[in-house]
Amino acid sequence: MKKEKILLAGATGYLGGYIAKRLKEEGYSVRLIVRNKKKVNFNDQEFEVYEGQVTEPASISKAFEGVDVVISTVGITRQKDGLTYMDVDYQANVNLVDAAKVNGVRKFIYVSVFRGDQMRHLQICAAKERMVDYLKASDLKYCIIRPNGFFSDMGDFLDMAKGGRVYLFGDGKLKLNPIHGADLAKECVRMVATTDQELNIGGPEVLSQNEIARFALKALAKQPKITHLPDWVRKMVLWFVRTFLSAKTYGPIEFFLSAMVMDMVAPQYGTHKLEDYFLAKAKVE
Ligand SMILES: NC(=O)c1ccc[n+]([C@@H]2O[C@H](COP(=O)([O-])OP(=O)(O)OC[C@H]3O[C@@H](n4cnc5c(N)ncnc54)[C@H](OP(=O)(O)O)[C@@H]3O)[C@@H](O)[C@H]2O)c1
């Protein structure tokens, strides 16, 4: 049976890279839409690569010819282009939805954030959830993926551990289940052929922040030194960044400081273990 054609936006990023590979493994015909072809860091011979700016609707419409399903992981994480979450996480994805509609795309799969709908007061979630609302109202078939923190983001613990000490807010007992890109990509690709409209998803292991800190310190062969900071310090930092930094700069800090004081346990998927990821990362750094 002929497999559908997928247009993937975000393939130059952490999750998008895994989704591209997974789509190929499952025999889909894949077109990548990227803003700079030179950033495609895997064998691009296997993929059709279309260069276009998702922030500029006129430059992307041709990418949708013959496309059945769109998957978008486009969003600001560490990019410093001077654009806001509303410019990218909302508007650029809206541009993709509009072009998908005009070109008769069957389904749109969008990656938001676990519990994003409960955190609309944060810059990043406000933009992502506005995009979710837009997609839901678009008449396209859709699936919203709501993942917990990625292993790539847990690198912040490893970075702190390099200094020999990890700082946590509160008693460190709050739990989360971060997920590896490959495990998440597998489920995102599975959504192409299901009728599910939403997927809340985390990794296989539920860990406390203390456990994650210990894994990071152990991977770097450091003594387990963890400092627990009182919550007023977090609130003060939050106030400081919101008051004195531009929204573009404080967005990621705001999300991190807010998620750190929530239990973030999502339905469990996948097989990759965070301890192994830290050990492998510590070896190459
Ligand atoms: N990291 C986490 O823990 C986490 C958790 C839950 C949800 N999410 C969400 O999942 C999505 C994927 O995350 P990720 O870690 O894979 O992010 P990533 O590695 O930063 O990838 C983001 C993708 O978006 C593209 N992008 C960003 N700004 C753009 C712009 N102005 N114009 C065109 N393309 C742009 C990037 O292109 P370039 O490579 O050209 O910059 C990249 O392909 C994001 O929306 C993120 O918010 C992340």
Image (tube, rainbow, N blue to C red):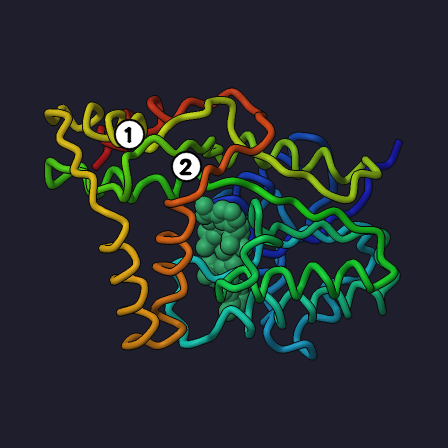
Q: Three-letter amino acid code at disc 2? A: Phe
* 53, above or below 26, in the image: below
- Where residue 210 is drawn, which disc sits there? 1
In the picture, residue 270 is in which quadrant? top right
Left/right placement of residue 97 relative to residue 246 reads right
Seen from the viewer's position, the closer of residues 61 and 123 is: 123
Seen from the viewer's position, the closer of residues 44 and 199 is: 199
- Where residue 44 is drawn, which disc sits there? none
> Are there few (<14), some (14-19), or many (20+) residues within 10 Å of tag 2?
many
Q: Three-letter amino acid code at disc 1? A: Asn
Which residue is at a point 13% across and 31% down the rendered structure image?
Answer: 225
Q: In terms of secondary structure, where does tag 1 sit?
A: helix
Counting from the top left corner in percent of width and height, residue 242 is at 34, 71
Q: In terms of secondary structure, where does tag 2 sit?
A: helix
> Are there few (<14), some (14-19), or many (20+) residues within 10 Å of tag 1?
many
Which residue is at a point 42% across and 48% down the rendered structure image?
Answer: 259
Seen from the viewer's position, the closer of residues 70 and 187 is: 187
Mark 1 touching mark 2, by CB under 8 A? no
Q: Is mark 1 within 8 Å of ligand 1?
A: no
If you read the primary sequence from the N terminus, does the residue marked by circle 1 or circle 2 appear first? 2
Confirm whether residue 78 shows in the render. yes
Seen from the viewer's position, the closer of residues 113 and 272 is: 113
Counting from the top left corner in percent of width and height, residue 97 is at 74, 64
Counting from the top left corner in percent of width and height, residue 149 is at 46, 41
Counting from the top left corner in percent of width and height, residue 201 is at 60, 35
* 10, above or below 204, in the image: below
Q: How many marks?
A: 2
